[in-house]
Structures are given as structure tokens and as C-alpha cells.
Amino acid sequence: MAQARDPLEKKLTAEETIVALATPPGRSALGIVRLSGPRCREFARVLLGTELEPRRATARPLRRGGAVVDRVVATYWAGPSTPTGEDLLELVGHGSPELLREIVSAALEAGARAAAPGEFTRRAYINGRLDLAQARAVGDLISARGASARSAALRRLEGGLSKALDEVRAPVLELLAALEVRLDHPEEDIASLSGDAADASLKDAAARLERLASGCTRGRSRREGARVGLFGRPNAGKSSLLNALLGRDRAITAPEPGTTRDLLEEQAELGGACVVLIDTAGLRADAAGPAERQGVARAELALESCEVAVLVVDAARAADEHDAKAHSSVATAAARRGAHLIVALNKMDLVGGHGAAEGLPCSALTGQGLAELEAAIAAAAGAAAADEGEALLDDARQLDALKLARAELDSARAELAARPASWEDRGADRLRRVLALLNEARGDGTPEAVLDEIFSKFCVGK
Amino acid sequence: MADAFFPRRYDVIVVGGGHAGVEAALAAARMGRATLLLTQNLDTIAAMSCNPSIGGVGKGQMVREVDALGGEMAKAADRSSFFSQTLNLSKGQAVRSPRAQCDKAAYRAGQKAVVESCANLDPIQDEAWELWVEGSALRGVLSRRGTRYEGKTVVLTTGTFLNGLAHVGLKTHAAGRGGEAPALGISASLRALGFAVGRMKTGTPPRLHSRSIDYSKLERQDGDLIPKPFSHFNVKISNPQLPSWIAYTNALTHRTIRDNLKNSPLYSGKIEGVGPRYCPSIEDKVVKFPSKERHQLFLEPEGWNTSEVYLNGMSTSLPEDAQRALVSSIPGLENALLTRCGYAIEYDFCQPTQLTDTLESRAVPGLFLAGQINGTTGYEEAAGQGLLAGVNAALRVADEGPFRLGRDEAYLGVMIDDLAVRGVDEPYRMFTARAENRLSLRADDADLRLMEKGFALGLIAPEARERFLRYRDLVLGAGEAPDADLSPWSMAKVLEQRAIRSSYEPYISRERREAERLKAAELVEIPPRLDYAAIGALTNESREKLSRLRPRTLGQAGRVPGVTPADLQILWVHSDRAK
């Protein structure tokens, strides 16, 4: 066993207690939420209303805000003889994503912090529970997760959350720039900022954040499960296949190409795996009108965010160069992102047995080969499910950040009310934090952005 | 002709006698090192080549910091100021900033006298031509006259002189500062040593003859009724005060500018150097903000015994006749005589990411760069860097550990970190917006933040420190003491400081907590020879940037644009503690 590292680095892990989901979400019999850090015992008391004896599994109802969330089996271990070298609390609940998220949220509200990627391992290393070689292996793991983090970010992008965040961020940035320019350039003849206007924009931003946070909670369950996209040339039968897999007519289908324009998302259980099936517009470079072109753009975006890409090929038609191009672009994107690729050779009923191309022969019309396709998707989605755990935690962190940002906006308003004549430096401090939190929720941003805003809006300097 | 060897050997050779050079030389000499100040012209030591003022928002805080660390700039300003203002007086204490207009001649003369009377410091007039490097070892400096000056360390503070090229309209001439000669040798020498050398641009407005100005058409502006000294060690300013005057540009001025843009070196593409966004020429202001109907101008006297007036806000490089037309379009200046034309100046700079966070070159150990050569602008930014470079050169000579300031400790720390970690893409000027801990980095508490450090370096006298400690204990504790024991501090200052601290309390604690949290990452040192190429898990962009910038700590790596949290975690694991 490696030696414990020096106290300074131990301090790096801070006195914070972290929480994360330890099992892949999706629906399963059981799910585990794990906490590590000095306040584990205290959190157990808050969440379960009882003092836990070390190393003894205890069944207790877990409460969030007074209401029972789930009946869990909780076990507490005292550090340092634990995998992380710290106090550890494990909560085993029922394997429903909604319940597990509630448990994580309850822990966050009790004062835990959402764990950063790889943080459990990092703590283990710092506390001498892992040696360097093992820890380096974790480093590689973290980078492998980069791909899924990116797809999670893109998923949000697609869900419009990013746009909604921008809508909050823009007025905050504008107000901050207005404050900063007056603080840094008093010699310029810039009119002073009206307190009423500032208060109105703070209030407006707070209201937007409020809406965003509640929308976030509601919208998340829809996104549960691995994302499975159906891609291919127009008229390959993607929508028919979606309907066949769902067992009902969800998508409009028609013999003419380009029927599907918008993305269509449906939650489904395929071969026991919880997935989101996405029907997309056919990929073609010569899309007919603006609506179809936009449909193609969305399909390309969906390609960047799915864990499983199903390439639907019209087996009844000889492949031309456009087919080859569309197929290779799907395959390339999937390979680049580490997404699973499944080739479905559709319309086998029209082919009459022959099937030269590689892939799963099937027919949306007759149901031929659908069971095999389902099984292949389920296997791929099951392998992808671990990535979803990260996404779920991302969501928890995101919601955390939005709530804190909201509180900062309220404090800024309080500052403005308390000292209307000289609130700017304190108010700016609050707004800087709001921006940092919004950037955290979004995953980008620098202080330079503020300076850029200043220089584009104001003529500064002499 | 064989080179002549200068008879004395030095610990620290400072090249350049501007604001950076003076602070560097004084700091090194006061720390007991044999120091040489090499300048092209001993008569222009500490010349204020542009505006006749010291301080401003952000900059004023830095001058206070330089003073708390035992630097000279604040005292020089107090000696020569004739108009003092606390900027942002109506706003929160954290952003109140001192600024003073100074008599240029008095400022210069004062600094020259300080330099001349400083023990261990030899001021010599000669032009440094080449860095004297043998193998990879720095030996000193070779002058244009062929004299070899031997020194263990060299601090380059060459300002805008390196290959300086002044523009007035489409005419150009090689120049350093004002009418002085440029420095031609050093750039080539730096390039030969492998430095990436870039080009920057700055500008200055025309000067007017006071007699030709109709002051009755201008708005008078007076400084603070009771001028507040810049320096912690001065209690009052008794210099005679002078007013400034405010004028405005108008539609005619703007039309004249637009009509002359074809003759502007800025807009005809003649100037390749990057200029600052925040100190724009009047051409820039009019072109980029066409809807603004007028721009404010300040007429500031250049001193007590001169008739020259600085036209603050009218920086321009338009041709001479156009400059005259511009000026005369302004009410009150119809008949103004331009004693000197405005000009733009292009000069060489070295991207400061080639330096460590002590301003020492990574390629040539012992070589320090400070001031405008690092792509900054402003006397105050230069003085701050000069002080830190001088201190670190002195420490290096004695094999003592480096002196660094964190972003949470001082504006000086913010500046050095910005320069060494992020680099510059336009002349760098300090703003309070750059400081994360703005509410803790105030002009009023520079002494509380830094004076003990200045004492530890040997730059603050023990007697002064004793009084400071008394003051500090009173601020932090309770009780009262007779003013006489505290001077130049006072009980009034104690009470004021207590009130400020308590009014910012929740913010200051939060900034301190945040700084503590971040400090952990600043204490994790990345091995200096870490092979980034061998770390497969890093993104290509991060790998390229990190191996070029070589951040010293994990915290610095985190501030490199484009480096992600995942990269940091990987780096952290690789910051192998196995020594």
C-alpha cells in the first residue's frame, strides 16, 4: 500500500464531503449513492434521522424536506480504512433514476458537494490508498470520459438549456460591464447608472433563473437513458423503423423522401434497456427547402450527442455516391466520439433474400430481424449507460449552480437597496459570482469576457 | 578594437533608467547588491514621456503597493504633485483610487537625486548594445562603445526604445521616447538568444502653449481641497496646486478626423503593432464610436515652471497640419500653438509568457525583463515590475528563494500572473476588473497587505516598521494610542481602517476563503521538466500550450486559456510528489 502523502496535499481535498451516484442509472433493481468525507456521519443523521453504527447495514427511510424519498439500506465506514481513506457512507436504494436523483439532491441540500469526475479516486490517491500507477490509470479514464462529458454538453445544447442560460447571462454581463466601466473609468463622461434600471434587470435575471431551474428539474427525466439515434439517407425508412421499434405509429411516415424534418425523441425500453430513440431527417447535401435544411442540421447535431448511432440503409436500392457519403459521415462521427455504431439493412422484404452489405438485415414492414436489432441496441445502450451517470451528476451540479446564482442576484438587489449611492463594487462582486456560476452550469467562460464586453460597448480611455 | 572591461563587477545590471529601471536599481542596491544603472541619458532618468500624472483606478492601488514594499514611485509623486484627486470618491472604498498630476521636471529631478544618493548604486551613461552570454551563461552587457560590463544578473527595462519608430502622419522616424534616440542593438541580441520579439504601438497627444489657450471658454477643474499623499510615509502635501481644464471635441473635430484618415498611419495600414483598446487615439474613438457626439479632453499643465500643457484625450498620429486643424476646432483652442505634435510609436516587446513568475527569462537564467518590454503600458505597471524584477535579481544573486505575490495579495501579483501565464495581445494596463479579490485589494490597506514583506526584504526601515506594527495591531485589535507613537500613521487612520474593514466584512471573508481554497492549487508545483508529450490523456491543445508555457504550479496551469478541469486532474496526478 502506498504511503499517505504529505498533509498539505491532504488539505487539497478540503474538508468537503462529496456525493456521487456509484451505479449506472437506467432502471435496475438497486442503485447506490456514495458519499465520502468528514461529514458522512452527520449527513446520515440528517438524511436518515438516526446515528449509524460503523460497518452495520441499517434499513431506514430516507427523507428529503420531511418527505420520505425511499427506504434505503445505509452503511457507514469510518476512515481511514476505506477505499477513499475518508469516512464513507453508502446508500443503497431502489434503482429508479428519479429516486436516486432525489437521494443525491437530498445529500446536496444537507451540505454535500457533487463530486468532480474522478474525485473519489483522487482522494484515494491522496490518502495513500492507491499508488501512482493506479492513479495514472484513472487519469486515462478521466480523459475517456471527456467524450461523454462533451456529449452531455451537446445534449444540453440541443435541449435549449444553453440558449436559456445565454438569455440569463447576457443581461447580467451587460449590467456587470456597465458597473465595471464606471468603476474603472470614472474620468469618462459616462452617465451614472439608474438604480431603478439596475434593480429591474437584476429582478428580471432572477426570474429567468427561477424559471430555468424549475424547467431543469422537470425536463430531466425525459432525457433519461442512452440516446439512440436513427440516421441515414432520406427515405431509408428511419421513421418506419422507429414506429416498429416503439410498437406504435409515433412518427409520420410517407413514401416520399424528406418527410421527417424535426427531431423526434421517444423514451422506450428495448430488450430491457432504458433508451431514448431519436428519429432524424435524412442526411443529404441538397436539402430542398429551409425547413429540410434545418432538419439536416439537427440530425447532424443529434449525431454529436448520441451514445448509439443506428445507420439505417435502404437495402432494396443500389448504393450511390450520396449513400456512401452519408454512411461514411455517420460512421466517422460515431468512431470519433466512441459511440456504438449499428448498421440496420432495412426493407429486406423487398430484397428477396440477397444481402451483400454488412449489417443486421431487418424490415420495419414485416418485423423481420427486429428482435435482433432490439437486442443489438440494448447491448450497446447497456454499455453506454455508465456514461449517463456522469450526465446525471452534471445535472445535479448544474442545478446547484443555478440556485446559488439566484441567491447571489438577490444579494445584489439587497446591496442596491441598502446603499444605493455606493453599491457598485459590492454589487459587481455578486454579479461576477453569478457569471461564474452560470459559466459553471454551462461549462465555459473567462473574466476576459467582461473586458471584451466593456470595450465593445464603451469608448474608454484618453 | 578590443573590448574594454569596466573595472567594477556587479551583482545586478539594470539597463534603462525609466520607471521600471529606477525601481529595479533602487531595490537591488538597497538590498545590498552592487548595482549598475546603465542609461542612454542620465538627464532623462524617470522621465514622464506621456501624461504628467501618476496613479488612477487600479494603477493608484499599485503605486501604493510599490510604496508599501519600499519602492520609490509614491514618494516621487508626492514630491512633485500639484493636483491630487481621489477617483471614485462617491463609490465604494474598494475602488477609490489616488491619482496625482506631477511636475515632470521636478519628478525627474527628484528621482535622479534619489538614484545618485543611493549606496551601492552606480548610474552610468552608456548604451547597452548586446547581452553578453557565453554558452548559456549570462555574463553581463556589452555597450555600444565596446565596454564590457560584468554582472551576475541583468534587468532589461528598455521601455518603448527597442527599435522605436515614431509616426506623425505618413512620416516616420526612428525614435525612443519623445525626441530621444532609439535603442537598436538589444532586440537583435534577444532574437539571437531565441526570444520571440513582437511589435506594439502606443501614442501620445500634442502639447499646447499655455499662453495661446483661451481659458475663459473652458471648464475649470480643481484637485482635492486637501491633497492626500500617495506615500504611506508622508502626512501632507504642501506643494502649490494648479487647476486642470476640461474641453470637448465637436462635429467639426470629428469631420476633420474622418477627412484625414487616409493620411493616418493607423488607418492606412502603416502601423503593424497592436495598440491598446483602452487608451485609443482620437482617430480610433471617432471611427469606432461614430454615434458619440463629443469626447472629453483634459488640459493638464506639465509643471510649475513650464508653459506646456498636455492635451489629455487627444492622442493622435495624424499629420501635423491635421493635428493643428483638430485642435483649433475646439472652443478655447482656436488659436492654440502646438509646441509638440502628437505621435504614435511602435516598438519591440517580448511576449512575457517567455518569463517565469519572477520575470526571469526561462531561456537565459539571470536575465530579467520589466516594463514595456513585456508588453505593458503605463508608468505604474512599469514601476511595479521593475521593483519585483530588481528584488528577484537581488535574491537570485544571494541564492535566496524568489519573491512572489499571489493574485489575492496584490494588484502586482495579478499583473505578474496575467503576464507570465496568459501573455498579452495588446498593451497591458491594470484595471480593477482584472482582480478577483478587488474588495480586499484596496489602496487604503496596501500597507497592511505588504509592508511586512517589504521589511523582510530589507526595503522598509526598522523604525518605520515598528510604527507600522503598532498601527496594525490597533486596526486588528482595539484600544487607542497617542498619534505621536504612530506617525506617519494616526489614530484617525486606525478608526477609518476599522470602519472600512467592518463595512466589507462578509465580502472580505468570502474572498479570503476563496483564496484559501485556490491557494492549495498554487502550492502544487508541476515538475519543471515534465514531459507533456508523454501524457496521452491531455487534449492536444492543452499539451501544446502547457509545454510552451510551462506553468510552475497547478493553479497557473488552471488559468491557461483552454486547459480544462479534466486536464488539471490529470496534471495533478502527474505532479509526482516523488522528488
Image: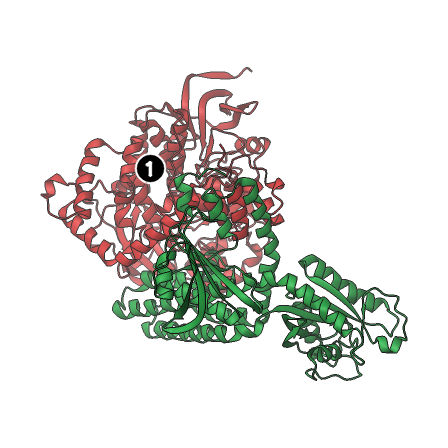
Chain colours: A green, B red
The spot of residue B69 in percent (x, y) is 30, 38
Q: Please state the chain letter of the residue tagged with numbered disc 1 in the rendered image.
A: B
The spot of residue B397 in percent (x, y) is 41, 25
Observer-nearest of B578 and B218: B578
Indicate the amino acid at tag 1: Arg
Judging from the image, what secondary structure is the residue with disc 1 in?
Answer: helix
| Apparent side of residue A355 relative to residue B210 in the rendered image (left or right) | right
Viewer can see residue B127:
yes
> Residue at position x 43%, y 72% from top?
A69
Residue on which the image places disc 1: B108
Observer-nearest of A303 and B491: A303
The correct choice, above or below, for B160 with respect to B38 in the image is below
The spot of residue A375 in percent (x, y) is 72, 68
Taking the view exactly as shown, the residue that stands out farthest to the left is B482
Viewer can see residue B427:
no
* Number of numbered discs overlaid on the protein picture: 1
| Apparent side of residue A139 relative to residue B205 in the rendered image (left or right) | right
> Residue at position x 32%, y 44% from top?
B63
Q: Residues within 10 Å of mark 1 (few under 14, many from 20)?
A: many
The spot of residue A379 in percent (x, y) is 69, 64
Could you say which quadrant of the image residue B194 lies in? Answer: top right
| Apparent side of residue B484 relative to residue B307 in the rendered image (left or right) | left
Quarter of the image with the C terminus of chain A in it: bottom left
